[in-house]
Image (cartoon, rainbow, N blue to C red):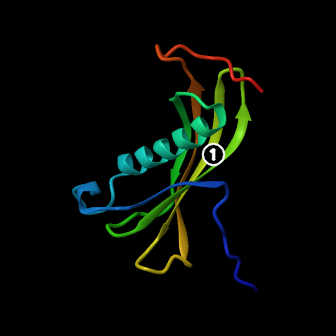
Amino acid sequence: MKNIILLPKGKLCLQVVAMPSDTNPSGDIFGGWLLSQMDIAGGVFCRSIVKSRVVTVSIESTEFKTPVFVGDTLSCHVSLIKIGNTSLKIHIESWISRGFNNDNQIKATEGIFTFVKVDKNGKPLEIKK
């Protein structure tokens, strides 16, 4: 049987190294930090599409697949699922590489997020298609 190599899907929108200040009491990287990085990556991706301010309105699902440790490089990849009247539904995958070998990446989390295009007052704006 051949080894299947999984690769990230979507556009690379963020890379960051997990630091000691990002840990929970057990010494693993805190799940909230991971969600925050995914949210930032999603915002970068959606802003590039709508050329405007966006806000997160929901996280439909998130699955944590493997722990992230201090020193891991986290890469967030984003792909578009659907554009609505004011919203964008996206899929975000977070992958980690350990040490200095970026060839061996491990999927850490993935989830479905929804962002809404808003004006300066936070009111939804139509996305022109």
Instruction: Tell me the quarter of the picture where residue 116 sits.
Output: top right
Q: Percent x, y for residue 16?
A: 41, 59
Q: Which element type, helix, strand or loop, lies under badge 1? A: strand
Residue 113, relative to residue 122: is it above or below?
below
Image quadrant containing the N terminus: bottom right
Residue at 66 percent across and 67 percent down: it is 7
* Residue denoted by label 1: 91
Q: Percent x, y for residue 26?
A: 25, 61
Return the residue nearer the eye: 129 or 106. Answer: 129
Q: Percent x, y for residue 51?
A: 61, 32
Residue 19, relative to residue 98: is it above or below?
above
Q: Residues within 10 Å of mark 1 (few under 14, many from 20)?
A: many
The outermost residue toward the bottom is: 1
Residue 99, relative to residue 44: is it above or below?
below
39 to the left or right of 117: left
112 to the left or right of 82: left
Residue at 46 percent across and 43 percent down: it is 40
